[in-house]
Image: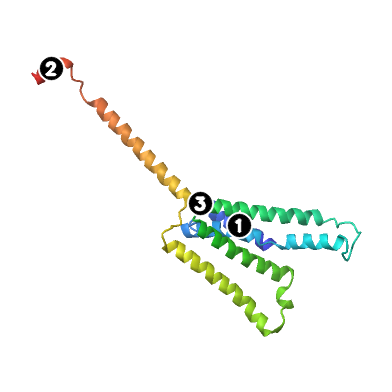
Amino acid sequence: LGCMVLWMAVLGYVILRKSSKFSTKTARRFAWGVAGGSITGLQNFLKDSLTIIKAVGPGGASAGMPYPWFFPLLATLAAATSFTGLLFLTACMKKFDATFSSAMFVGSFVVSASIMSAVHYSTFEDLEGIVNYIMYPLGLMVLMAGVAVLLRNTASGGEDVVDTDEVCEYRGDVLESHGSNESASGRSNMRQPLVSPKSQVGELT
């Protein structure tokens, strides 16, 4: 959990500190894409909550016993991580292409859930046989390869990955320069000498 907090702090720094040398366009896109999946990958809170409900419920191993004191905390964290991850995904889809956002979300979600499962549930200790030790990492690599293909097609295809913040900044610069040009043309028109109607009539005759 501490590593996840540190990881999200790094992503937040890249997203918010645009003036930093580490906060490049690619880094911001990566941070926005993986933030939601990294948080949603904390599925241990949800699994532990469901395990407690099943154990305490009718027919469970601890049927009839009260819920432990930490159950509300686990349920709250389960709801908070899922909801926060969806908020990050929605914000990412508003800023970038939907294919880019969904691919980065799924890839980071699977990696985050796999790491949390290995740490919290000791997944690799339950694998039996050399085949499982090979197929499990191979499956993750195949998934990440598919995510990479989607990202490459998004970047090279007709749908470009566009940062809406950059578009807003560009529009602001254009409006500012347009306003300065209008004010400059207005000042130049004010400096032109006024011509009386009589002189205009004389020129026409």
Q: How is the image coloured?
A: rainbow
- Hey, what amino acid is under mark 3? Lys
Q: Position of residue 4 (x, y in %)?
A: 66, 61
Nearer-N-terminus badge (2/3)? 3
Assign the N terminus to one quadrant of the image: bottom right
The numbered mark, 1 or 2, whose residue comes first in the sequence reads 1
Amino acid of disc 2:
Val
Type of amino acid at the residue the image marks with label 1: Gly
In the rendered image, which residue does mark 1 sit on? 36
Considering every residue shown, the one lying at the far front of the view is 59
| Residue designated by label 3 | 95
From the viewer's perspective, is 177 left or right of 190?
right
Query: Which quadrant of the rendered structure holds the C terminus?
Result: top left
Is residue 188 toward the left or the right of residue 159 in the image?
Answer: left
Marks 1 and 3, the one that precedes in the sequence: 1
Query: Residue 8, percent across and down?
Result: 62, 58
**Residue 108: % across, % down:** 59, 64
Q: Residues within 10 Å of mark 2 (few under 14, many from 20)?
A: few
| Residue labelled with disc 2 | 201
**Residue placed farthest to the top in the image?**
198
